[in-house]
Amino acid sequence: MSPRPKRKRILSEPPAVSGFVPESGDYSLALEDTVVLHFEEYEAIRLADYEQMTQLQASKRMHVSRPTFTRIYESARKKVAKAFIENKRISIVGGNVAFDADWYRCENCGSVFKRKAGQKAKSCPVCGDRQIVPLEQAVNTFPERSRGGGRGGRFHGGRGVAGFCVCPKCDYKVQHSAGVPCGSLLCPHCNIRLIREDSEHYQIILKKRKK
C-alpha cells in the first residue's frame, strides 16, 4: 500500500534570496558544508518569527495541520542553528510547495516573475526565451545536491549598502535599502523581481540583450 501523498504547503511568494553564507565564510564551500532549507521551512520561520503569527495561524496560512506546521518549524530552526554554530552556508531549495499566485522562472536568464491568475506565461518578459517553467515545478523537482555553483550562487553577497535595485526588463530602479533584498521587490510595471544593478545576474541579462 503506497503512502498517502503529502499535501503541498502554500506560500504567498518565493523567498527573496536563494541562501546565505557566513560573513567570514568561504563562498566556495563544498556541498557537504551546506545546510539545505526547504521552501516550506523558510516560510514557517517567516510566518512564526518574522510575522509573529501563532502556530495555528501560520498552519492555516500554509494549509497544513498545526502538528504538521510544528514539525516543519522545528526542523527549520534546527537547520538554521546548525548553520550558525557550525559556520555552514544555507541553501534555500526544494520542498513540497505551491504558490497562491502564478510565479515563473526563466531557465535562460534566471529572471523570476509572476502573472495574474489565469494569465499563462508563454515567454520570458526579460529575454524573450520560451524556456520558462512554473516556479512551483522548479522548486518541487530541483535536485538539492546540485546546488553548488552557477546560478545557484547568486546569493553570494558582499556588495554593501550602496547602489540600486533594478528591473531586468524596463530598467526601473530604486535605491537599495540595507537589509532589504532586491529580490523582495517587484517592478510596479512588469511584475518582475528586481535584481542588484551591479550583480553578475544583471550583467548576464545585459549581454543577452545585446545579442
Image (cartoon, rainbow, N blue to C red):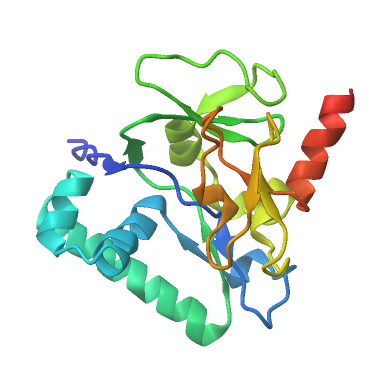
Q: Residue at x 34, y 36 (%)?
A: 99
Q: Quadrant of the C terminus?
A: top right
**Residue 57 quadrant:** bottom left
- The percent position of residue 181, horizontal first and vertical second, equals 56, 57
Q: Residue at x 35, y 20 (%)?
A: 117
- The percent position of residue 146, horizontal first and vertical second, equals 63, 50
Q: Is residue 64 visible?
A: no
Which of the pair 88/19 is nearer the observer? 19
**Residue 179 quadrant:** bottom right
In the rendered image of this protein, does residue 46 appear above or below residue 206?
below
Instruction: State the count of labels.
Output: 0
22 vs 69, left or right, is right
202 vs 20, left or right, is right
Q: Is residue 133 visible?
A: yes
Q: Residue at x 59, y 23 (%)?
A: 132
Q: Quadrant of the N terminus?
A: top left
- The percent position of residue 59, horizontal first and vertical second, equals 16, 53
In the rendered image of this protein, does residue 91 appear above or below residue 2?
below
- The percent position of residue 16, horizontal first and vertical second, equals 51, 52
83 vs 2, left or right, is right
Which residue is situated farthest in the bottom direction here?
Answer: 85
**Residue 111 quadrant:** top right
In the rendered image of this protein, does residue 74 appear above or below residue 185?
below
Q: Residue at x 56, y 34 (%)?
A: 192
